[in-house]
Amino acid sequence: FISDGYLNEENWDYKKFKNDYRTQTKTTPTIYNIVGYDCCRYMLRALPDTKGVPPVTRAEYLQNLRSQGPYNGLYRSIRINEDQYNLQLRLLKYIFGQIIPLN
């Protein structure tokens, strides 16, 4: 089946995120927290280091978003096309009670 994401709970980056999140908020992150984290990290990558330089314009920021390569987050992979759609989907297989991503 097709999904917009897959969470590998054994992934070291996810475990670190979960522990840091729990330390700061005293709650366990939900899937929405993880999706928000992935989206925010993707969007922040498009902002250049502007030390001493005027901030980017909206048009420059949009161009930076479109031109950056694919982002593989904790749950969601993101690759934006010219029409501003995310082209990344995950093919998953359900077998013997487990969900396994297909590459």
Image (spheres, rainbow, N blue to C red):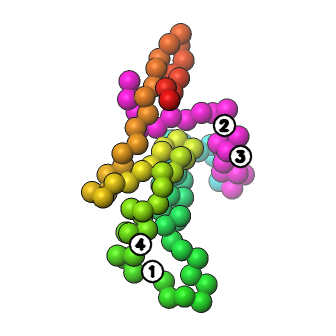
Please state the extent of the stretch shown in magenta in the rendering.
1-24
SS at mark 2?
loop
* Residue 63 forms part of the magenta stretch: no
Please state which of residues 86 and 22 is positioned toward the viewer in this rendering.
86
* Residue 19 forms part of the magenta stretch: yes
Q: Which residue is mark 3?
A: 16
Cα distance between the residues tagged 1 and 4: 6 Å
User: Tags 3 and 2 in contact by the CB under 8 Å rule?
Assistant: no
Would residue 3 be seen by someone viewing this image from the given angle?
yes
Question: Could you tell me which quadrant the N terminus lies in?
Answer: top left
Please state which of residues 86 and 17 is positioned toward the viewer in this rendering.
86
User: Tags 1 and 4 in contact by the CB under 8 Å rule?
Assistant: yes
Q: Earlier in the sequence, mark 1 or mark 3?
A: 3
SS at mark 3?
helix
Q: Which residue is mark 1?
A: 56
Cα distance between the residues tagged 4 and 3: 29 Å
SS at mark 4?
helix
Amino acid on which disc 1 is placed: Val
User: Tags 1 and 3 in contact by the CB under 8 Å rule?
Assistant: no
Residue shown at the point (43%, 68%) measured from the top left: 64
Amino acid on which disc 3 is placed: Lys
Question: Given this view, does label 4 or label 2 mark the residue nearer the observer?
Answer: 4
Q: Which residue is mark 2?
A: 11
Cα distance between the residues tagged 3 and 2: 9 Å
Taking the image as shown, residue 6 lies to the left or right of residue 15, namely: left
Cα distance between the residues tagged 4 and 2: 31 Å
Position in image of residue 25 (x %, y %): 65, 53
Question: Given this view, does label 1 or label 3 mark the residue nearer the observer?
Answer: 1
User: Tags 4 and 3 in contact by the CB under 8 Å rule?
Assistant: no
Amino acid on which disc 2 is placed: Asn
Q: Residues within 10 Å of mark 1 (few under 14, many from 20)?
A: some
